[in-house]
Image: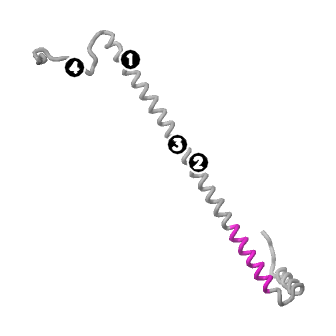
Amino acid sequence: MFDISFSELALCFVVALVVLGPERLPKVARTVGRWSGQAKAYMRNLTNELERESNVAEIKKQFDDARKTVEEARADIEKSSRKIADDVRDKLKPADEAGSPPPDTAPTPPGDAPKS
């Protein structure tokens, strides 16, 4: 990002020593160091927050994809179950029209008359 060589840094230090004086230079250096540390911490927190948001967005996308897959599977199952029900209904319809008993009631065998 910034390319500062040692000679440029030494020049800045000499200028600061001349302008600020030996009494105020340590205090200013501490303040600049504190600001630099706070800026680094802020950037680190910002980076972590952006990374966390990226992970949340990725998880949300995966969740939406899974929900879509489940909905498609549910629709397919519902469609196939309706088709099966329609097929069964179509097969039972001719038997009902012929007058045969429904398949769930079995005829009583001869000789087994109901007892009252």
How far from the left and from the top, in percent, is residue 34?
A: 73, 78
User: Do tag 2 and tag 1 residues touch (Cβ < 8 Å)?
Assistant: no
Which residue matches tag 2?
61
Magenta region, residue range: 26-43
Q: Which mark is residue 67?
A: 3
Can you say whether 66 is above or below 83 in the image?
below
Q: For the residue carrying disc 4, how many other residues have a C-alpha within 10 Å: few (<14), some (14-19), or many (20+)?
A: few
* Residue in the image at 89% along x and 87% along y: 18
Q: For mark 4, give the secondary structure.
A: loop
Q: For mark 2, give the secondary structure.
A: helix
N-terminal of the pair, mark 4 or mark 3, is 3
Q: Which mark is residue 106?
A: 4
Amino acid type of disc 2? Lys
> In the figure, is residue 100 to the left or right of 17?
left
* Residue in the image at 38% along x and 17% along y: 90
Main SS of residues in magenta: helix
Front position in the image: 75 or 31: 31
Q: For mark 3, give the secondary structure.
A: helix
Can you say whether 98 is above or below 34 in the image?
above
State how far apart marks 1 and 4 are (Cα). 21 Å
Q: For mark 1, give the secondary structure.
A: helix
Amino acid type of disc 4? Ala
State how far apart marks 2 and 3 are (Cα). 10 Å
Amino acid type of disc 1? Asp
Q: Which mark is residue 90?
A: 1
How far from the left and from the top, in percent, is residue 5?
A: 81, 78
N-terminal of the pair, mark 2 or mark 1, is 2
